[in-house]
């Protein structure tokens, strides 16, 4: 279960300190037997200086704990079969992997999948499945050559694939979607378990929803004992928590949804070297942080959402480990502009000599620029859920003229109120109500959005809009997706972030869309506005007359693409800037990321897309670091007051 050579096996998750030698890893407690020692010392052996070299004689040791009482130990084959038998019977098994625990069930069993959902309190968010080979992946999903290469790469990420109609996996694995996340075994333990069960396994992080992944045996017994029927354990300590990385292929190129195991903390370059060490603390959602020394950036693995205290502790622990490993002591801390972010408070707690605040969408654009070694200027299209704007309002559908040191807002989505604030992301009908408040005469087109909604809740939300109480005005593209889903009668409540948008993309499938009205208008402040109200009204009216919702979902996407193209083209003509950056979590949508660049490039524009980092908030820390490095470099100083 733990076999390795110098090219495989754990690295960062077992390192205590650098350089990477066995004595500085969690393998230090296992003394190599004479056979392993011979391999390790033999320069002609593939295990020469394999720091995690081991065998059953010298450990680590694998065992299985059943909640009923007995502990299965001894030969690993018997241990594996005990876990496999539990999975075959519909049980949930927690197994200790490279970077933490994973929860596994039979992916072909609907009852087992539903049990896992109830145990994790994860009602609808899709699971990933693990299969033995690319050939087996092709039995359940469409896999092209680029996707096969990604699956079989040493990083072994979860790859988002289009599900086959005849796939044997339970529909509850990825409800409402036309894609499924698939990964191949990343450890020998996974290989052995899959061989024993003979079916695909759901393989999801070992935690309850929104908690950090468990890494220790005692921790797993406490946190996962009530979720899992059995625990597949070993005694090699995990030093760093690591989730699986997630990618999808768009036009044969990788688009990261989560960058973690297999990729982080491989360093990234910075187009402008920082004169002093920096720490960028990232955003509150999908958090990562970035440590900068000169032109080198060490970007953390996916940390998670900082609203939970355990995740904040995970942030602090990981930061301490990065600082020790890479010997970087930051003089300046970089944070988001939002004064109420948890990451803002974490930045202030570090008591740096200087803090630099970077606007959220500027960081999005800067991350893509920096990834391409570019300093700008560029026309930055930043589409996401929410970010704190420098006018004090909520931004999320932005066109910025930006370089690394600054930006100017050229256009944005028309503002609409979000009654209930953050609650809107879980209740799309609220987003629809916000847009309807801009033109109450369009109520007939919005009727489906409120079907089955509690009248008292709707009345209270309407009162919030009228009185401007917890109903911030927002230019959010993410909330526009929510509103469109509600208007089409598809989803009024979400079980997880982004569900409505994911289902809209899946529903559109491969249909060709036709653009509906999505006008670009001059704003009162000299900044253009994209007005989505005519688009939502048209969607609702066509749905009310019986038009196919799948076609309307395709039309919605086509409208965003054409509207964005017109907005960017107008800005390019005015500014003379021909370079365009696409960034923000909305661009996790493969349809947008495939078709919009084609339209823009046909206009003679150069398009920069995220390649090594995600378009979502996981890249914010890198963008913050790039902005701060450029600012400090331009100043030609080290520390000079708070910004």
Image: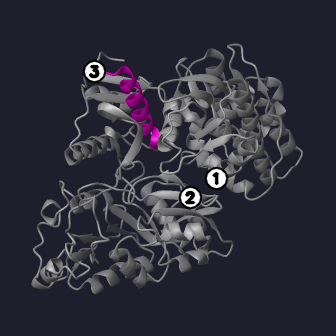
Q: Which residue is mark 1?
A: 590
Specify the quadrant that holds the N terminus.
Answer: bottom left
Viewer-nearest of discs 3 and 2: 3
Residue interval drawn in magenta? 619-637
Viewer-nearest of discs 1 and 3: 3
Q: Is residue 640 left or right of residue 182?
A: left
For marks 1 and 2 on the same chain, the one whose residue lies earlier in the sequence = 2
For marks 1 and 3 on the same chain, the one whose residue lies earlier in the sequence = 1
**Marks 3 and 2: CB-CB under 8 Å?**
no
> Is any atom of residue 596 visible in this view?
yes
Q: Residue at x 51, y 72 (%)?
A: 107
Of residues 565 and 533, which is closer to you in this image?
Answer: 565
Specify the quadrant that holds the C terminus.
Answer: top left
10 Å crowding of disc 3: few (<14), some (14-19), many (20+): some
* Res. 476 image quadrant: top right
Q: Is residue 632 magenta?
A: yes
The x and y percentages for residue 114 are 51, 64
Vertical placement of residue 60 versus 353, above or below: below
**Marks 1 and 2: CB-CB under 8 Å?**
yes
State how far apart marks 3 and 2 are (Cα): 41 Å
State how far apart marks 1 and 2 are (Cα): 8 Å
Vertical placement of residue 457 versus 102, above or below: above
Q: Which residue is mark 3?
A: 639
> Is any atom of residue 341 visible in this view?
no
Label count reads 3
């Amino acid at each position: 279960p733990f076999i390795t050579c110098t090219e495989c096996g754990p690295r960062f998750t077992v390192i205590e300190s650098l350089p990477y030698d066995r004595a500085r890893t969690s393998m230090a407690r296992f003394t190599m037997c004479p056979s392993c020692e011979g391999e390790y010392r033999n320069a002609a052996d593939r295990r020469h200086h394999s720091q995690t070299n081991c065998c059953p004689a010298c450990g680590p040791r694998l065992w299985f704990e059943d909640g009923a009482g007995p502990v299965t130990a001894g030969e690993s084959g018997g241990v594996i079969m005990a876990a496999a038998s539990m999975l075959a019977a519909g049980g949930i098994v927690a197994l200790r992997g490279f970077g933490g625990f994973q929860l596994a069930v039979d992916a072909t069993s609907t009852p087992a999948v539903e049990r896992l959902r109830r145990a994790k309190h994860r009602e609808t968010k899709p699971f990933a499945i693990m299969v033995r080979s690319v050939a087996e992946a092709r039995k359940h999903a469409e896999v092209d050559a680029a996707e096969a290469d990604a699956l079989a790469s040493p990083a072994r990420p979860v790859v988002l694939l289009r599900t086959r109609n005849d796939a044997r996996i339970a529909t509850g694995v990825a409800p409402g979607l036309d894609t499924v996340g698939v990964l191949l075994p990343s450890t020998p333990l996974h290989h052995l378990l899959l061989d024993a069960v003979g079916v695909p396994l759901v393989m999801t992080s070992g935690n309850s929803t929104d908690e950090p992944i468990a890494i220790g045996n005692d921790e797993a017994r406490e946190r996962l004992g009530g979720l899992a029927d059995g625990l597949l354990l070993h005694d090699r300590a995990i030093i760093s928590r690591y989730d699986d990385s997630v990618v999808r292929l768009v036009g044969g190129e990788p688009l990261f949804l989560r960058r973690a195991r297999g990729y982080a903390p491989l360093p990234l370059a910075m187009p402008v070297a920082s004169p002093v060490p920096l720490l960028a603390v990232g955003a509150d959602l999908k958090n990562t942080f970035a440590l900068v020394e000169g032109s080198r950036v060490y970007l953390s693995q996916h940390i998670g959402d900082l609203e939970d205290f355990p995740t904040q502790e995970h942030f602090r622990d990981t930061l301490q480990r990065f600082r020790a490993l890479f010997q970087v002591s930051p003089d300046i801390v970089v944070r988001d502009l939002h004064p109420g972010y948890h990451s803002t408070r974490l930045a202030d707690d570090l008591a740096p000599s200087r803090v630099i605040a970077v606007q959220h969408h500027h960081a999005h654009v800067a991350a893509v620029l920096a990834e391409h070694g570019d300093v700008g200027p560029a026309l930055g299209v930043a589409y996401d859920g929410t970010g704190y704007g420098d006018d004090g309002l909520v931004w999320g559908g932005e066109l910025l003229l930006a370089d690394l040191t600054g930006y100017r807002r050229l256009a944005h989505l028309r503002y609409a109120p979000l009654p209930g604030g953050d609650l809107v992301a879980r209740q799309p009908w609220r987003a629809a109500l916000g847009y309807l408040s801009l033109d109450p005469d369009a109520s007939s087109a919005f009727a489906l959005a409120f079907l089955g909604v509690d009248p008292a809740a709707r009345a209270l939300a309407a009162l919030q809009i009228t009185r401007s109480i917890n109903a911030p005005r927002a230019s959010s593209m993410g909330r526009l997706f929510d509103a469109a889903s509600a208007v089409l009668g598809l989803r009024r409540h979400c079980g997880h972030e982004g569900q409505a948008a994911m289902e809209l993309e899946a529903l559109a499938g491969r249909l060709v869309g036709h653009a509906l009205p999505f006008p670009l208008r001059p704003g009162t402040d000299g900044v253009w506005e994209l007005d989505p109200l005519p688009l939502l009204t048209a969607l609702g009216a066509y749905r009310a007359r019986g038009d196919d919702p799948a076609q309307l979902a395709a039309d919605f996407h086509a409208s965003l693409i054409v509207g964005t193209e017109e907005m960017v083209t107008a800005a390019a003509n005015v500014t003379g800037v021909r370079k365009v950056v696409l960034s923000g979590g909305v661009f996790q949508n493969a349809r947008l990321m495939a078709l919009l660049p084609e339209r823009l490039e046909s206009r003679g524009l150069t398009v920069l897309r995220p390649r090594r980092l995600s378009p979502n908030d996981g890249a914010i820390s890198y963008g913050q670091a790039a902005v701060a490095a450029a600012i400090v470099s331009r100043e030609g100083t080290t520390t000079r007051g708070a910004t």
